[in-house]
Amino acid sequence: MNVTLRQLRAFLAVARTGSFTLAAESLYITQSALSGLIKELEQTLGTRLVDRSTRRVYLTEIGARLYPMLDATLHDLDDMLHQVMDPSLQQTGVVRVAASQLLASTLMPELIAAFQAQHPLSQVKLVDTPVESVMARVFAGEVELGIGPEREPNSDITSARLFDGPFMAVFPAAHPLAGVERLHWSDLADQPVITLQGQFTELLSQDLRRAAPELSLTPTAEVTYMATVLSMVKAGLGVGLCIPYAASLVEAYGLQMRPLGSPEVRRNFEVFTRRGRSLSPAAQSFLDFIGPRIRAMPYLR
């Protein structure tokens, strides 16, 4: 059965107005075109829907039964299409985002709260996960967006830079480094250094060697979570390394952080998506919202 929307809308217009003349005017088509649409619909359905007299159009018994059901169905369809096309409604829906554990516990809640305050019909569901699982969550289709430190791209995942930030030294307020006006990487040479294990330290070591071959990074301890780094720093076991978006967590531990220079080493953070997949309007709206907001944060400039 090959019934078209044009045929159905033509029938509804005739049923509402009781006139081919008025129905044709409401649809901005000629009476002959309207008559053709009604005829095609009746032929497709195999039954007559309207009877015409010299003065008025009457619905047949089947036409009268069809009219209220069809009217309600097309009304719902029009509402749905309106929501799809209305820019003010395109940003509604659920956005699923995977973020590395440290991002999820520091930067992301603030961004999500600000976004939902401006888009109350949207909901962001945050999935906190180990750094190495962010891309896997995207690939599995569990989330639309993944946010984490830069990683090697692959054929299934595409990435785009979201922000970057310099490495910072973290220590207690009474630490000797607190009195140094400008910290250099060389100032850490005689300090026990505590870092995150895996690519955090591996990539940092590579970047330092490229920028200053005379520098080397040999951590005293490498741990899994930044909370462990900060607890060890607070206990006086060494100086920690982090990126400035962790400021709220550093402050919660009563510690200070200062940028490291000579050379300045920065780490990129990226948004990961499935290659070849379009984002939902809500996800795109969230991404458009958080990008400028992150880059405007003073400690990430």
Image (cartoon, rainbow, N blue to C red):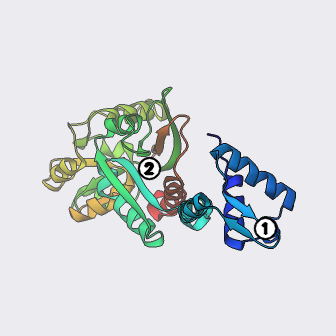
Q: CA distance from mark 2 to mark 1?
A: 83 Å
Most extreme residue toward the top, as rendered? 155
Residue 84 visible? The answer is no
Residue beneath the point at 44% across and 49% down:
166
Number of numbered labels in the structure image: 2
Quarter of the view holding residue 192: top left
Residue beneath the point at 76% across and 72% down:
56
Pick the quarter of the image with the N terminus: top right
Say what secondary structure mark 1 lies in: loop
Quarter of the view holding residue 113: bottom left
Q: Is residue 143 above or below residue 140?
A: below
**The label number, if any, that marks residue 100 in the structure image:** none
**Residue that numbered label 2 is attached to:** 166
Q: Is residue 111 above or below residue 218?
A: below
**Residue 170 at what x, y percent from top left?**
28, 54
**Residue 207 at what x, y percent from top left?**
44, 34
**The label number, if any, that marks residue 53 in the structure image:** 1
Residue placed most toward the observer, 243 or 20:
20
Q: Are marks 2 and 1 in contact (CB under 8 Å)?
A: no
**Residue 25 at what x, y percent from top left?**
82, 69
Residue beneath the point at 72% across and 66% down:
14
Give the residue type that dot 2 points to. Pro
Say what secondary structure mark 2 lies in: strand
Give the residue type that dot 1 points to. Ser
